[in-house]
Amino acid sequence: MATFAIESNGRIEKTVVYFNGQQLGGIKEIFLNLDEEGTFDGILQYEGTDKQIRTKQIFSEYLENLKIVEPSFTEEEATELQQLKIDSEGDIEDTIVTINDEELEGIVSLFVHIKSAENKNGISSLFSKNKIPDHVEFKAEITFRNEDDTTETEEIF
Amino acid sequence: MKTKINLLNLWALIILTTATLLLLSPDIAEARGSFGGRGFGRSFGRSFGGRSFGRSAPRSSFGRTRSMTSNPMRMSPSQRAASSFGGRSLGSSRDYTAKYGIPRKAQPFTGTNASGMRQNYIINNYGGYGNGLMMGYMMGHTSWMWMMPFHPAFYYSRPYYVDNPDGTVSVYPPTFDFGRLFFTVLIVGAIVYIIYVIIRNKRRMSRGYSSQSSFS
């Protein structure tokens, strides 16, 4: 079972990602789309230690050459952030979602899409004709089913 | 956002480059017109008595009517002097001596002006760096480096000259130009700052959003 966690205040500048308890660096994009119907997409795009960009299924593939970094936040700083944690085997039947160490129930769907803006390096970037910069994507929400059978969507961070 | 910043930086660089060229353009123009050769008495035009190809008859100054269009003798001393060393004309010697005092020494000097004519100069020595520059300009010993901001000569004016009633030209040493120093510091500072900002932004972007993010 792999553990994937995101700790954030809703801004990409203060968003850290953990995999099996270790903080990752070089993340480009996270896409999580889980729902009770059986949809299970957990995709991570990252730059490895060998500078290669890889796109992997978080819970079912081996994440090679992951960039492990030192923890960014102290415990005190972390209390000001929301932590979403997913423990899973790669299928919806065996998935536990927790927020701030509190196990959640009644989830209809979970959707997380966090994408950093693309960086172009080098002198050529100065003369780039691309006038529309890549925008940062930050969307994270959970839909719950209430006891009266209504559904409610909440922002995670 | 990043592209916008880069474009702004690029525009700033273009504006600063243009400003630098405008600052240097009078010197470049003068340098093209006046200097370029080393040694005293740069020759202008062809030497007399020379023979042109394709002509059968030898050239001579005698036996023809005088051309009035390009007569060097009709030029005033200042016209000749101006093109000789690219200096600045003063109304009278007092304009200079009132500010910088009486020269230590005034020595006559005969040189060739831009028209190739002999011209009597009176060189006013005040000593110091400006004096050396003045002699360099008079002797034609100048360098392209004098137009570069890293050379002290860049921050000095051209020699000053005054047309005397007796036909001689008094020459005074160049003076330090604080305005040029100010603008150079301003332009160089701005260029350095822009380069610093570009490098800093590049480093930040390559490092990621911050040290507190897993994203890069």
Image (tube, coloured by chain):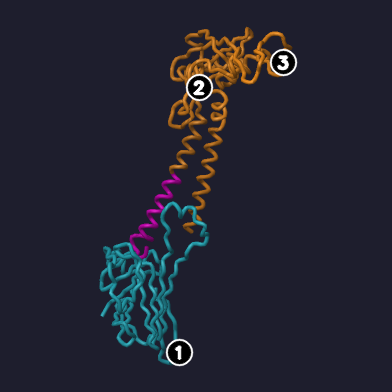
Please, which chain is the residue tagged with disc 2 on?
A: B
Dominant secondary structure of the magenta stretch?
helix
Q: Chain of mark 3?
A: B
Looking at the rendering, the stretch of residues picked out in magenta corresponds to B193-216
> In the rendered picture, chain A carries what hue?
cyan
Q: Residue at x 69, y 8 (%)?
A: B62
Q: Chain of mark 1?
A: A
Q: Which mark is residue B67?
A: 3
The residue shown at (43%, 46%) is B195
Residue B77 is inside the magenta segment: no
Q: Secondary structure at mark 2?
A: loop
Residue labelled with disc 1:
A150
Query: Are there few (<14), some (14-19), or many (20+) residues within 10 Å of tag 2?
Result: few
Left or right position of A15 against B92: left
Question: In x, y percent, where is residue A58?
Answer: 32, 76
The three-letter code of the residue at mark 2 reads Gly
Front residue of A16/A117: it is A117
Q: Residues within 10 Å of mark 1 (few under 14, many from 20)?
A: few
Q: Nearer the viewer, mark 2 or mark 1?
A: 2
Asked if disc 2 and disc 1 are in contact, CB closer than 8 Å, the reply is no
Cα separation between marks 2 and 1: 93 Å
Task: Give percent across and percent down for residue B206.
Answer: 37, 57
Disc on the earlier residue, 3 or 2: 2
**Which part of the image, by quadrant, shows the N terminus of chain A?**
bottom left
Q: Which chain is orange?
A: B
Specify the amino acid type for callout 1.
Thr
Q: Is residue B63 above or below residue B69?
A: above
Residue that numbered label 2 is attached to: B37
The mark total stands at 3
Please name whichever residue, B137 or A29, is drawn nearer the observer in this view of the structure.
B137
Marks 3 and 2 sit apart, C-alpha to C-alpha, by 29 Å
- In the image: residue B106, left or right of residue A121: right
